[in-house]
Image (cartoon, rainbow, N blue to C red):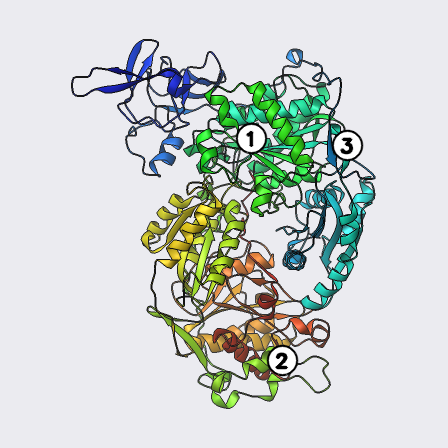
Amino acid sequence: MHDSTRTSHPEAEITMLRFDEVGVLPEPGDNVAISSRRLPAGTVIDFAGTPVTLPHTVLEGHRFVASPIATGDPLLSWNTPFARALRDLEIGDYVCTPTSLAAVSARGVEGLPAEPSAENEPLDPYELDESALNFGHQVTSVEQPGTFLGYPREQGPAGTRNHVVLMATSSRSSGFVTELARRFDDAAGFDGVVPVAHTEGGEDGTPNNLHFLLATLAGFALNPNVGAVLIVDTEGELVSGQAIKDFMAEHGYPPIRVPHAYFTRSAGFETDLTAAGRLVEPWLPVVAAQERQEVPLADLWIGLQCGGSDAFSGVSANPLAGAVGREVIRHGGIAVLAETDELIGAEGYVLKNVRDLPTAKRFLRTVQSFKERVGWHGHTAEGNPSGGNVYRGLYNIVLKSVGAARKLDRDVRLDHVIDYAERMPGHGFVFMDSPGNDLESVAGQVASGCNLIFFTTGNGSITNFPFVPTIKFVTTTTRYELLQAEMDVDAGRYLTGTPMDDLTAETLDLTVRVASGEPTAGERAGHSQVSIWRNWRQTAPRPGISITPNGRQTRNLTDLPEEDRDAPLPGTPLPLAGYAGSQVGGGEGALAPEAAGSAATTRAAGSPVPASGAAAAASVPGGALRLLRVDDRLVPEAVGLILPTSLCSGQIALRLAAQGELERWAGEAVTRMVALPHTEGCGSSGGASEETFARTMLGYLLHPNTRMALLLEHGCEKTHNDYFRSRLVEAGADPSRFGWASIQADGGIDAVTGRVRDWFNSFDLPAPEEVPGSLGSLTIALEARGPLNPATAEAMALVGREIVAAGGSAVLSSRGALLADENFRYAAFGSPAAVEPTIAHGQRFTANGWHVMRMPGTDWMETVTGFGAGGVQQVLAHVAGGTLSAQRFVPVVEFSTDPETVAQYGDDLDAVASGNAQEQATVALETIAAVASRQLVPKAVASGNVGFQITRGLLGTSM
């Protein structure tokens, strides 16, 4: 580094910086440089003896012109065109495209130009020149292969960890395995009992990602870091333990050789937890008795990932990860590159050295297939870079891809191309098809057999996988120092003079230590999550969508039908001519004093299961509602909400909400603290699915039950805090009402914990006042799962009529069993005719009454999440043949009139009803009152069987 010099200036003395102090050229011949620090407008830089004053602010990681560029000429990084000049550009001009300028302007940065200086380079299809391919050799093997201390397995490589894994086959069992794992938190002598809870496979019918899902689950069970595995499903579901067995047999998988069992849920939640726990307990001493042994480094199978990338990812962290991967290959191991859409534009670099022509062609077919799938949903790869990527200098997919490809070292040959979660075909360097969504991509690599993950990050991504350790490489020393507790490797030292060879040797040594048991920063932090390549809805282009060969969309998405776009609806209630109103008891119906203790609230004589929730409902004084007065409204509860803005901050939000509840951060101002972890906000397409996501998020921030709400961003997502600030303003809400925190910008988990605690502690709000209330103050969703008899269908209709007659609202799903039932429609609306949706998914309505929410699918958790975003305060669900998971925010009340369901699942029911429709409705209304009055906690909530899941609609897809 050179000392800054000073130069005279007519108005003031100005510090002049040398170019090599502030500019990074990825390769000789590039005509734009990356700024290594923030350079305010007016900064003077010495370009080879010529002082140049910067006309505009250049953010760290953004680019400025290093040599003159004429209008229309390409801007080069890594000697690759990524944009074209919109005017003649002089040395020092700030490089910004329309997208990047908008992204930076949205963050309130000052000193920016009024107009962009460049436009993105078109993504023309890559054309393979077979004659130019280099079918070279793989890197030379070391003379003396190294070793690490691992867990030998009967088949495949050794494990770097030794976990007992509790794996849900679908989202229906995710809450179950999470709670079961929690009960083994104290297990000692090995690396721990961990759940694999995910969002997939829970919908009715066959999902389009079924093959990927089964391959992933099968691969998880065979991963070398698994010392024992329990595979959990529910009765009658498509994605079952048997389906996994059949898939493995059909595709030639080896048998699972570690202790394992298949468990089907068939009774109450607690009963099943006890039974499943009995299967797991004998494995604990067996797994704990296994010891690490010296095994060859050839058993290291490393997944190469990047997330929260910035402009320096392709200069420091990615080349370092690639170099260490090269060394692992020299010892006989495997390195696996993924994230297909993040290599679009870098095909030539990936194929610079390839095993053979079929491998090259399979790679290009994989890229083309990904483009087509995304195109069916109306998107292109140009939508991949997140808001955080753009803000940190990755203006477009070309820059992101060329930088991401540097995880493939220049000396390394591409040996194999595999599908998502496919088993490894051999050693060397492997490319696996996957979306750019980090967590979904990691899941595929783990399923393919990877026992260690290299994760490079510019912003400081903190995500981890439950049973495979993640070593995090951060691109700059400044960011490493900010997030030192969360990061493992400071790749930024390369930018300040440390030779890459020295960093490679150091990091390889760390890799061996981690593989031998040294915990990573993420393992010390103790949080992780799983996300499998999420289902996509389309299998061919939708009418109205056409994608040109260069990947451009030729018709605006607003031309598509409203249902495809999930566009907002007027929000007015169903027009019901001649509607008679209350049909249960008159007036307040079932909540009149004389209704309390009705015979219908108890079971029929001889029933083996007590009426549970119904008995508790009868304890509400006079059967009346007791609500809370909060500000200007009456509500059943006052929630303190911590809302993660993307998937990567979800687990930390959960931790903070639990800590805030325990330590009473909000005092008596709230009745409980809630966090809503989800899979969205990054790594998925924009457009219609993003609009639905934003609407859902705002629905919870502005929900009548939400008294205090703080948004927790990861820091590099598409939908960051500033994004939601602007969305709140658009919705007419004051952003200053809400708390704002950032895991990355605030300095890591400990620092952000203090910030969140301080925000909740900063208020001195009075406790909500309990007052008499009525059904007219409530919004209740009605749902039915399983067979529905005519009397129960009528009873559910009567419940809705009672609520609406009192001035409240009843909400149904357009895909639900109730609306499909002719008896229900006749009893509810006076006509069996079909009714149309009144609100979009997660939309707030404009007036109380009967409402139908448009639902793109049948997944239960997505349905109830949409209900909650629309303002629903409680869900009443009649169940038959099984029970449901609860939702974290909206209480789900489950009752049944089916004797077999009562006998088998009675412990999970909040109420049991019998008799005619009016008697059943009385039970349901009393139970609603008990929960709304905080006298009854729904069984699923109390047991920890909870979840939260946001739909991607019909046009959302992973990217």
Q: Quadrant of the N terminus?
A: top left
Callouts 3 and 1 close, C-beta under 8 Å: no
In the rendered image, which residue does mark 1 sit on? 342
N-term-proximal mark, 1 vs 2? 1
Q: Position of residue 482 (x, y in %)?
A: 44, 37
Q: Position of residue 957 (x, y in %)?
A: 56, 42
Residue under the image location 46 percent in, 39 percent down? 716
Q: Secondary structure at mark 2?
A: loop
Q: Nearer the viewer, mark 3 or mark 1?
A: 3
Q: Amino acid at mark 1?
A: Glu
In the rendered image, which residue does mark 2 sit on? 913
Mark 3 crowdedness (10 Å alpha carbons): few <14, some 14-19, many ≥20? some
Q: Amino acid at mark 3?
A: Val
* 757 is higher (above) or lower (below) than 125: below
In the rendered image, which residue does mark 3 sit on? 295
Mark 1 crowdedness (10 Å alpha carbons): few <14, some 14-19, many ≥20? many
